[in-house]
Amino acid sequence: MTGFFRDIPKLTYQPDADSDFAFRHYDPDEIVMGKRLEDHLRFAVAYWHSFAWEGGDPFGGRTFDRPWFGSEMEKAKLKADVAFEMFDLLGVPFFCFHDADVRPEGADFAETTRNLEEITDYFAQKMEGSKTRLLWGTANLFTHRRFMSGAATNPDPEVFAWSAATVKTCMDATHRLGGENYVLWGGREGYETLLNTDLSREAEQAGAFLSMVVDYKHKIGFKGTILIEPKPQEPSKHQYDYDVATVYGFLKRFGLENEVKLNIEQGHAILAGHSFEHELALAASLGLLGSIDMNRNDYQSGWDTDQFPDNVPEVARAYYEVLKAGGFTTGGTNFDAKLRRQSLDPEDLILGHAGAMDVCARGLKAAAALLEDGALEARRAERYAGWNRPENKALLTSDLASIEARVRDGGLNPEPRSGRQERLENLWNRYV
Ligand code: XLS
Ligand code: NI
Ligand code: NI
Protein backbone atom coordinates (compact mmCIF):
# COMPACT_ATOMS: atom_id res chain seq x y z
CA MET A 1 0.00 0.00 0.00
CA THR A 2 1.28 3.46 -0.83
CA GLY A 3 -0.59 5.13 2.04
CA PHE A 4 -1.74 7.94 -0.25
CA PHE A 5 -5.40 7.50 0.66
CA ARG A 6 -4.48 7.00 4.32
CA ASP A 7 -7.42 5.58 6.27
CA ILE A 8 -10.17 6.11 3.67
CA PRO A 9 -12.30 2.94 3.76
CA LYS A 10 -13.47 0.95 0.76
CA LEU A 11 -16.80 2.46 -0.30
CA THR A 12 -19.91 0.31 -0.15
CA TYR A 13 -23.62 0.83 -0.59
CA GLN A 14 -25.00 2.12 2.73
CA PRO A 15 -28.10 4.19 2.06
CA ASP A 16 -28.34 5.33 5.68
CA ALA A 17 -24.66 5.85 6.46
CA ASP A 18 -23.47 8.88 8.41
CA SER A 19 -20.11 8.80 6.68
CA ASP A 20 -19.37 10.67 3.44
CA PHE A 21 -17.47 7.60 2.25
CA ALA A 22 -20.42 5.49 1.18
CA PHE A 23 -22.74 5.11 -1.80
CA ARG A 24 -26.31 6.11 -1.12
CA HIS A 25 -27.80 5.18 -4.50
CA TYR A 26 -25.22 3.02 -6.23
CA ASP A 27 -25.67 -0.60 -5.24
CA PRO A 28 -23.68 -2.50 -7.88
CA ASP A 29 -25.79 -5.62 -7.34
CA GLU A 30 -29.19 -3.97 -7.61
CA ILE A 31 -31.13 -5.43 -10.54
CA VAL A 32 -32.55 -2.83 -12.93
CA MET A 33 -34.35 -3.94 -16.09
CA GLY A 34 -32.99 -7.44 -15.57
CA LYS A 35 -29.34 -6.41 -15.23
CA ARG A 36 -26.99 -5.52 -12.35
CA LEU A 37 -26.49 -1.78 -11.93
CA GLU A 38 -22.72 -2.20 -12.20
CA ASP A 39 -23.20 -3.93 -15.58
CA HIS A 40 -25.48 -1.14 -16.81
CA LEU A 41 -23.29 1.77 -15.81
CA ARG A 42 -19.84 0.26 -16.39
CA PHE A 43 -18.02 3.07 -14.59
CA ALA A 44 -14.48 3.98 -15.58
CA VAL A 45 -11.92 6.30 -13.98
CA ALA A 46 -10.05 8.56 -16.42
CA TYR A 47 -6.36 8.24 -15.57
CA TRP A 48 -5.44 11.63 -17.02
CA HIS A 49 -7.66 13.85 -14.91
CA SER A 50 -7.21 11.95 -11.67
CA PHE A 51 -3.51 11.17 -11.79
CA ALA A 52 -1.74 13.13 -14.53
CA TRP A 53 -3.38 16.55 -14.43
CA GLU A 54 -1.53 18.95 -12.15
CA GLY A 55 -4.25 21.53 -11.50
CA GLY A 56 -3.06 24.20 -13.93
CA ASP A 57 -5.25 26.73 -15.73
CA PRO A 58 -4.39 29.45 -18.28
CA PHE A 59 -3.42 31.79 -15.45
CA GLY A 60 -1.57 29.55 -13.07
CA GLY A 61 0.39 26.32 -12.91
CA ARG A 62 0.29 23.27 -10.77
CA THR A 63 -1.75 23.34 -7.57
CA PHE A 64 -1.65 19.61 -6.77
CA ASP A 65 1.36 18.16 -5.05
CA ARG A 66 1.35 14.46 -5.81
CA PRO A 67 4.24 12.20 -4.85
CA TRP A 68 4.21 10.59 -8.33
CA PHE A 69 4.76 13.79 -10.33
CA GLY A 70 8.01 13.55 -12.27
CA SER A 71 9.42 11.90 -15.34
CA GLU A 72 11.05 8.74 -13.94
CA MET A 73 9.68 5.25 -14.48
CA GLU A 74 9.60 4.74 -10.70
CA LYS A 75 7.19 7.66 -10.41
CA ALA A 76 5.03 6.21 -13.20
CA LYS A 77 4.83 2.97 -11.24
CA LEU A 78 3.94 4.77 -8.01
CA LYS A 79 1.20 6.54 -9.95
CA ALA A 80 -0.11 3.16 -11.11
CA ASP A 81 -0.01 1.82 -7.54
CA VAL A 82 -2.08 4.75 -6.28
CA ALA A 83 -4.45 4.50 -9.25
CA PHE A 84 -5.21 0.84 -8.59
CA GLU A 85 -5.69 1.60 -4.88
CA MET A 86 -8.29 4.18 -5.86
CA PHE A 87 -10.01 1.79 -8.30
CA ASP A 88 -10.27 -0.67 -5.45
CA LEU A 89 -11.61 1.84 -2.91
CA LEU A 90 -14.30 2.88 -5.38
CA GLY A 91 -14.97 -0.63 -6.71
CA VAL A 92 -14.97 0.68 -10.28
CA PRO A 93 -15.00 -2.03 -12.96
CA PHE A 94 -12.94 -0.02 -15.49
CA PHE A 95 -10.31 2.63 -16.17
CA CYS A 96 -9.15 4.49 -19.31
CA PHE A 97 -5.78 6.01 -20.22
CA HIS A 98 -3.68 7.81 -22.83
CA ASP A 99 -0.07 6.70 -23.38
CA ALA A 100 1.18 10.06 -22.09
CA ASP A 101 -0.74 9.71 -18.81
CA VAL A 102 0.99 6.53 -17.80
CA ARG A 103 4.59 6.62 -19.08
CA PRO A 104 7.33 9.23 -19.32
CA GLU A 105 8.27 10.41 -22.80
CA GLY A 106 11.67 8.95 -23.81
CA ALA A 107 14.52 10.51 -25.76
CA ASP A 108 13.18 9.04 -29.00
CA PHE A 109 10.29 6.97 -30.33
CA ALA A 110 11.92 3.67 -29.42
CA GLU A 111 12.52 4.66 -25.80
CA THR A 112 9.01 6.10 -25.45
CA THR A 113 7.60 2.82 -26.74
CA ARG A 114 9.75 0.79 -24.34
CA ASN A 115 8.43 2.90 -21.47
CA LEU A 116 4.87 2.26 -22.57
CA GLU A 117 5.50 -1.46 -22.84
CA GLU A 118 7.03 -1.57 -19.38
CA ILE A 119 4.03 0.19 -17.86
CA THR A 120 1.66 -2.01 -19.85
CA ASP A 121 3.33 -5.04 -18.25
CA TYR A 122 3.06 -3.36 -14.88
CA PHE A 123 -0.68 -2.72 -15.44
CA ALA A 124 -1.15 -6.33 -16.53
CA GLN A 125 0.38 -7.51 -13.24
CA LYS A 126 -1.77 -5.12 -11.21
CA MET A 127 -4.90 -6.19 -13.08
CA GLU A 128 -4.30 -9.78 -12.01
CA GLY A 129 -5.00 -8.76 -8.43
CA SER A 130 -7.81 -6.35 -9.22
CA LYS A 131 -11.35 -6.50 -10.53
CA THR A 132 -10.75 -3.36 -12.60
CA ARG A 133 -10.42 -3.86 -16.36
CA LEU A 134 -9.61 -1.54 -19.22
CA LEU A 135 -12.57 0.23 -20.85
CA TRP A 136 -10.38 1.93 -23.42
CA GLY A 137 -6.92 3.07 -24.31
CA THR A 138 -6.01 6.00 -26.52
CA ALA A 139 -3.03 7.99 -27.82
CA ASN A 140 -2.34 11.51 -26.68
CA LEU A 141 -1.72 13.20 -30.04
CA PHE A 142 -2.25 16.74 -28.78
CA THR A 143 -0.02 17.73 -25.84
CA HIS A 144 3.48 17.54 -27.31
CA ARG A 145 4.49 20.48 -29.50
CA ARG A 146 5.07 18.16 -32.48
CA PHE A 147 1.27 17.88 -32.75
CA MET A 148 0.60 21.61 -32.71
CA SER A 149 -0.63 21.57 -36.35
CA GLY A 150 -2.46 18.28 -36.07
CA ALA A 151 -1.62 14.58 -35.94
CA ALA A 152 -3.22 12.68 -38.86
CA THR A 153 -4.14 15.99 -40.49
CA ASN A 154 -0.73 17.63 -40.07
CA PRO A 155 0.74 19.29 -43.20
CA ASP A 156 4.02 17.51 -42.33
CA PRO A 157 3.97 13.84 -43.44
CA GLU A 158 6.53 12.98 -40.74
CA VAL A 159 4.03 13.96 -38.07
CA PHE A 160 1.40 11.80 -39.82
CA ALA A 161 3.87 8.90 -39.69
CA TRP A 162 4.79 9.55 -36.04
CA SER A 163 1.08 9.65 -35.13
CA ALA A 164 0.29 6.43 -36.99
CA ALA A 165 3.22 4.69 -35.32
CA THR A 166 2.10 5.97 -31.91
CA VAL A 167 -1.46 4.77 -32.42
CA LYS A 168 -0.10 1.34 -33.33
CA THR A 169 1.76 1.14 -30.01
CA CYS A 170 -1.31 2.32 -28.09
CA MET A 171 -3.55 -0.21 -29.84
CA ASP A 172 -1.00 -2.91 -28.95
CA ALA A 173 -1.07 -1.84 -25.30
CA THR A 174 -4.89 -1.73 -25.28
CA HIS A 175 -5.10 -5.16 -26.90
CA ARG A 176 -2.56 -6.67 -24.48
CA LEU A 177 -4.61 -5.39 -21.51
CA GLY A 178 -7.89 -6.74 -22.89
CA GLY A 179 -9.32 -3.26 -23.52
CA GLU A 180 -12.95 -3.26 -24.61
CA ASN A 181 -12.60 -0.24 -26.91
CA TYR A 182 -9.98 1.98 -28.51
CA VAL A 183 -10.71 5.74 -28.67
CA LEU A 184 -9.57 8.45 -31.05
CA TRP A 185 -10.14 12.01 -29.96
CA GLY A 186 -8.72 14.49 -32.47
CA GLY A 187 -8.02 17.54 -30.36
CA ARG A 188 -5.59 18.99 -32.87
CA GLU A 189 -7.33 17.57 -35.94
CA GLY A 190 -8.74 20.88 -37.05
CA TYR A 191 -7.42 24.31 -37.83
CA GLU A 192 -6.79 27.78 -36.52
CA THR A 193 -7.15 29.64 -39.82
CA LEU A 194 -8.38 28.66 -43.27
CA LEU A 195 -5.66 30.93 -44.70
CA ASN A 196 -3.08 28.17 -44.21
CA THR A 197 -5.33 25.11 -44.36
CA ASP A 198 -6.27 22.73 -47.20
CA LEU A 199 -9.54 21.19 -46.01
CA SER A 200 -9.83 18.52 -48.69
CA ARG A 201 -6.29 17.28 -48.22
CA GLU A 202 -6.63 17.11 -44.45
CA ALA A 203 -9.88 15.17 -44.74
CA GLU A 204 -8.20 12.64 -47.07
CA GLN A 205 -5.37 12.25 -44.55
CA ALA A 206 -7.84 11.69 -41.71
CA GLY A 207 -9.78 9.13 -43.78
CA ALA A 208 -6.62 7.20 -44.70
CA PHE A 209 -5.46 7.27 -41.07
CA LEU A 210 -8.72 5.90 -39.69
CA SER A 211 -8.83 3.18 -42.36
CA MET A 212 -5.37 2.07 -41.22
CA VAL A 213 -6.54 1.97 -37.60
CA VAL A 214 -9.46 -0.27 -38.61
CA ASP A 215 -7.20 -2.53 -40.71
CA TYR A 216 -4.74 -2.87 -37.84
CA LYS A 217 -7.54 -3.75 -35.43
CA HIS A 218 -8.49 -6.68 -37.66
CA LYS A 219 -4.88 -7.63 -38.27
CA ILE A 220 -4.12 -8.10 -34.56
CA GLY A 221 -7.52 -9.61 -33.80
CA PHE A 222 -8.59 -6.82 -31.45
CA LYS A 223 -12.22 -7.57 -30.65
CA GLY A 224 -13.02 -4.21 -29.06
CA THR A 225 -14.79 -1.28 -30.68
CA ILE A 226 -13.00 1.61 -32.36
CA LEU A 227 -14.58 4.85 -31.13
CA ILE A 228 -14.29 8.43 -32.32
CA GLU A 229 -14.97 11.13 -29.74
CA PRO A 230 -16.54 14.23 -31.33
CA LYS A 231 -15.75 17.73 -30.07
CA PRO A 232 -16.30 21.00 -31.98
CA GLN A 233 -13.41 23.11 -30.70
CA GLU A 234 -10.85 23.56 -27.92
CA PRO A 235 -7.95 23.23 -28.30
CA SER A 236 -8.39 23.96 -32.04
CA LYS A 237 -10.59 26.81 -33.18
CA HIS A 238 -12.44 24.36 -35.40
CA GLN A 239 -12.19 20.58 -35.03
CA TYR A 240 -13.12 18.20 -37.83
CA ASP A 241 -14.97 15.74 -35.56
CA TYR A 242 -17.40 18.52 -34.69
CA ASP A 243 -20.37 16.50 -33.48
CA VAL A 244 -22.21 13.23 -34.08
CA ALA A 245 -23.73 14.30 -37.40
CA THR A 246 -20.40 15.52 -38.75
CA VAL A 247 -18.57 12.34 -37.79
CA TYR A 248 -21.33 10.27 -39.38
CA GLY A 249 -20.76 12.10 -42.68
CA PHE A 250 -17.02 11.50 -42.38
CA LEU A 251 -17.46 7.78 -41.68
CA LYS A 252 -19.86 7.40 -44.62
CA ARG A 253 -17.47 9.22 -46.90
CA PHE A 254 -14.70 6.72 -46.15
CA GLY A 255 -16.97 3.66 -45.87
CA LEU A 256 -16.22 3.16 -42.17
CA GLU A 257 -19.71 3.53 -40.70
CA ASN A 258 -19.93 -0.15 -39.82
CA GLU A 259 -16.45 -0.29 -38.30
CA VAL A 260 -16.38 2.70 -35.98
CA LYS A 261 -18.76 3.94 -33.29
CA LEU A 262 -18.77 7.04 -31.12
CA ASN A 263 -17.69 8.01 -27.63
CA ILE A 264 -19.96 10.92 -26.76
CA GLU A 265 -19.03 13.44 -24.08
CA GLN A 266 -21.47 15.66 -22.23
CA GLY A 267 -19.27 18.76 -22.28
CA HIS A 268 -18.50 18.39 -25.97
CA ALA A 269 -22.18 18.16 -26.83
CA ILE A 270 -22.76 21.44 -25.01
CA LEU A 271 -19.83 23.11 -26.81
CA ALA A 272 -21.37 22.01 -30.12
CA GLY A 273 -24.63 23.75 -29.21
CA HIS A 274 -26.48 20.49 -28.56
CA SER A 275 -27.74 18.74 -25.49
CA PHE A 276 -26.05 15.50 -24.41
CA GLU A 277 -29.28 13.58 -25.01
CA HIS A 278 -29.52 15.00 -28.53
CA GLU A 279 -26.10 13.61 -29.38
CA LEU A 280 -26.91 10.26 -27.77
CA ALA A 281 -30.29 9.94 -29.47
CA LEU A 282 -28.83 10.83 -32.85
CA ALA A 283 -25.93 8.40 -32.46
CA ALA A 284 -28.35 5.66 -31.41
CA SER A 285 -30.57 6.33 -34.42
CA LEU A 286 -27.52 6.02 -36.69
CA GLY A 287 -26.35 2.83 -35.00
CA LEU A 288 -23.23 4.58 -33.72
CA LEU A 289 -23.76 4.78 -29.96
CA GLY A 290 -20.65 3.27 -28.38
CA SER A 291 -19.66 4.77 -25.04
CA ILE A 292 -19.96 7.96 -23.02
CA ASP A 293 -17.62 10.41 -21.32
CA MET A 294 -19.67 11.60 -18.39
CA ASN A 295 -18.92 15.05 -17.08
CA ARG A 296 -20.68 18.38 -17.10
CA ASN A 297 -19.80 21.76 -18.45
CA ASP A 298 -20.23 25.01 -16.66
CA TYR A 299 -23.06 26.63 -18.61
CA GLN A 300 -21.61 30.11 -18.14
CA SER A 301 -18.13 29.29 -19.50
CA GLY A 302 -17.48 28.56 -23.14
CA TRP A 303 -14.96 25.76 -22.62
CA ASP A 304 -14.72 22.16 -21.57
CA THR A 305 -14.72 22.44 -17.78
CA ASP A 306 -14.87 18.66 -17.25
CA GLN A 307 -16.65 18.71 -13.91
CA PHE A 308 -18.05 15.68 -12.16
CA PRO A 309 -21.77 15.32 -12.90
CA ASP A 310 -24.04 16.53 -10.09
CA ASN A 311 -27.39 16.95 -11.79
CA VAL A 312 -29.65 13.91 -11.59
CA PRO A 313 -32.39 15.07 -14.01
CA GLU A 314 -29.79 15.84 -16.72
CA VAL A 315 -28.03 12.55 -16.25
CA ALA A 316 -31.39 10.74 -16.35
CA ARG A 317 -32.10 12.18 -19.82
CA ALA A 318 -28.80 10.78 -21.02
CA TYR A 319 -29.33 7.30 -19.58
CA TYR A 320 -32.87 7.23 -20.96
CA GLU A 321 -31.36 7.37 -24.44
CA VAL A 322 -28.71 4.79 -23.58
CA LEU A 323 -31.28 2.37 -22.13
CA LYS A 324 -33.72 2.95 -24.96
CA ALA A 325 -30.94 2.00 -27.38
CA GLY A 326 -30.46 -1.28 -25.49
CA GLY A 327 -27.71 -0.20 -23.09
CA PHE A 328 -23.95 -0.42 -23.41
CA THR A 329 -22.24 -3.37 -25.04
CA THR A 330 -18.49 -2.69 -25.07
CA GLY A 331 -19.03 0.92 -23.92
CA GLY A 332 -19.43 2.36 -20.46
CA THR A 333 -19.52 5.53 -18.36
CA ASN A 334 -16.07 7.08 -18.29
CA PHE A 335 -15.68 9.93 -15.81
CA ASP A 336 -13.79 12.31 -18.06
CA ALA A 337 -14.03 14.73 -15.14
CA LYS A 338 -11.52 16.45 -12.97
CA LEU A 339 -11.40 18.03 -9.56
CA ARG A 340 -11.46 21.79 -9.25
CA ARG A 341 -7.90 23.00 -8.81
CA GLN A 342 -8.52 23.99 -5.18
CA SER A 343 -9.55 20.43 -4.28
CA LEU A 344 -6.14 19.35 -3.06
CA ASP A 345 -6.82 16.46 -0.73
CA PRO A 346 -6.67 12.77 -1.60
CA GLU A 347 -10.22 12.40 -0.28
CA ASP A 348 -11.46 14.92 -2.86
CA LEU A 349 -10.54 12.42 -5.59
CA ILE A 350 -12.56 9.70 -3.91
CA LEU A 351 -15.55 11.91 -3.13
CA GLY A 352 -15.67 13.42 -6.63
CA HIS A 353 -16.06 9.96 -8.08
CA ALA A 354 -18.35 8.63 -5.35
CA GLY A 355 -20.79 11.51 -5.76
CA ALA A 356 -20.77 11.14 -9.53
CA MET A 357 -21.43 7.41 -9.24
CA ASP A 358 -24.43 8.07 -7.02
CA VAL A 359 -25.76 10.74 -9.39
CA CYS A 360 -25.44 8.37 -12.35
CA ALA A 361 -27.07 5.52 -10.43
CA ARG A 362 -30.04 7.73 -9.49
CA GLY A 363 -30.33 9.01 -13.04
CA LEU A 364 -30.21 5.57 -14.59
CA LYS A 365 -32.77 4.17 -12.15
CA ALA A 366 -35.16 7.05 -12.85
CA ALA A 367 -34.74 6.58 -16.59
CA ALA A 368 -35.28 2.83 -16.29
CA ALA A 369 -38.47 3.33 -14.29
CA LEU A 370 -39.93 5.62 -16.94
CA LEU A 371 -38.86 3.34 -19.76
CA GLU A 372 -40.34 0.29 -18.05
CA ASP A 373 -43.55 2.16 -17.33
CA GLY A 374 -43.78 2.77 -21.07
CA ALA A 375 -45.92 5.93 -20.75
CA LEU A 376 -43.53 8.22 -22.60
CA GLU A 377 -42.92 5.76 -25.42
CA ALA A 378 -46.65 5.09 -25.73
CA ARG A 379 -47.32 8.79 -26.18
CA ARG A 380 -44.51 9.14 -28.65
CA ALA A 381 -45.86 6.19 -30.64
CA GLU A 382 -49.34 7.64 -30.54
CA ARG A 383 -48.07 10.87 -32.06
CA TYR A 384 -46.92 8.97 -35.14
CA ALA A 385 -49.80 6.48 -35.20
CA GLY A 386 -51.18 7.84 -38.48
CA TRP A 387 -48.21 6.31 -40.24
CA ASN A 388 -49.36 2.80 -39.33
CA ARG A 389 -52.25 2.97 -41.81
CA PRO A 390 -51.27 1.26 -45.09
CA GLU A 391 -52.31 4.19 -47.30
CA ASN A 392 -50.03 6.47 -45.27
CA LYS A 393 -47.11 4.05 -45.18
CA ALA A 394 -47.37 3.99 -48.97
CA LEU A 395 -46.62 7.73 -49.05
CA LEU A 396 -42.96 7.05 -48.44
CA THR A 397 -42.60 5.01 -51.60
CA SER A 398 -44.96 7.10 -53.71
CA ASP A 399 -44.16 10.09 -55.94
CA LEU A 400 -45.14 13.73 -55.86
CA ALA A 401 -47.72 13.54 -58.68
CA SER A 402 -49.61 10.60 -57.14
CA ILE A 403 -49.55 12.29 -53.76
CA GLU A 404 -50.91 15.45 -55.30
CA ALA A 405 -53.78 13.48 -56.83
CA ARG A 406 -54.54 11.89 -53.47
CA VAL A 407 -54.59 15.20 -51.63
CA ARG A 408 -56.73 16.91 -54.27
CA ASP A 409 -59.21 14.10 -54.93
CA GLY A 410 -59.39 12.86 -51.35
CA GLY A 411 -60.10 16.34 -49.97
CA LEU A 412 -57.26 16.08 -47.41
CA ASN A 413 -57.13 18.94 -44.96
CA PRO A 414 -54.76 18.24 -42.02
CA GLU A 415 -55.83 19.48 -38.59
CA PRO A 416 -52.93 20.48 -36.26
CA ARG A 417 -52.68 18.48 -33.00
CA SER A 418 -51.02 19.50 -29.75
CA GLY A 419 -47.44 18.38 -29.24
CA ARG A 420 -48.30 18.10 -25.53
CA GLN A 421 -44.85 19.10 -24.41
CA GLU A 422 -45.88 20.32 -20.96
CA ARG A 423 -47.83 17.16 -20.30
CA LEU A 424 -44.76 15.10 -21.21
CA GLU A 425 -42.52 17.29 -19.08
CA ASN A 426 -44.85 16.70 -16.15
CA LEU A 427 -44.73 12.99 -16.80
CA TRP A 428 -40.93 13.07 -16.97
CA ASN A 429 -40.71 15.00 -13.71
CA ARG A 430 -42.77 12.40 -11.89
CA TYR A 431 -39.83 10.04 -12.38
CA VAL A 432 -36.78 12.13 -11.54
C1 XLS B 1 -10.84 16.21 -24.33
C2 XLS B 1 -11.27 14.83 -24.46
C3 XLS B 1 -10.24 13.79 -24.04
C4 XLS B 1 -10.65 12.44 -24.58
C5 XLS B 1 -9.55 11.46 -24.64
O1 XLS B 1 -11.62 17.14 -24.33
O2 XLS B 1 -12.46 14.67 -23.76
O3 XLS B 1 -10.12 13.78 -22.67
O4 XLS B 1 -11.69 11.90 -23.85
O5 XLS B 1 -8.50 11.89 -25.43
NI1 NI C 1 -13.43 12.89 -23.36
NI1 NI D 1 -13.44 16.55 -23.19
Image (cartoon, rainbow, N blue to C red):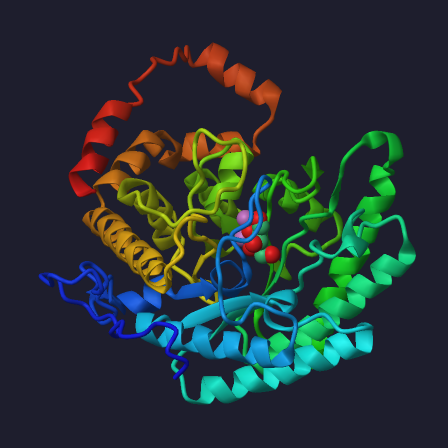
- State which quadrant residue 240 falls in: top right
Q: Is residue 215 visible to us here?
A: no
| Quadrant for the C terminus in the image | top left
Residue drawn at 51 percent across, 47 percent down: 283
185 over 394 or under it: above or below: below
- Residue 311 position, x and y percent, is 30, 42
Residue drawn at 78 percent across, 53 percent down: 145
Residue drawn at 51 percent across, 74 percent down: 79
Residue drawn at 64 percent across, 73 percent down: 103
**In the visual, does 353 lie left or right of 135?**
left
- Residue 377 position, x and y percent, is 28, 41
**In the visual, does 317 lie left or right of 75?**
left
- Residue 31 position, x and y percent, is 21, 67
| Quadrant for the N terminus in the image | bottom left
- State which quadrant residue 123 falls in: bottom right
231 over 176 or under it: above or below: above
- State which quadrant residue 226 falls in: bottom right
179 or 192: nearer the viewer:
192
> How many numbered badges does the structure rendering display?
0
Farthest residue in the left direction? 16
**In the visual, does 267 lie left or right of 90?**
right
- Residue 111 position, x and y percent, is 78, 78
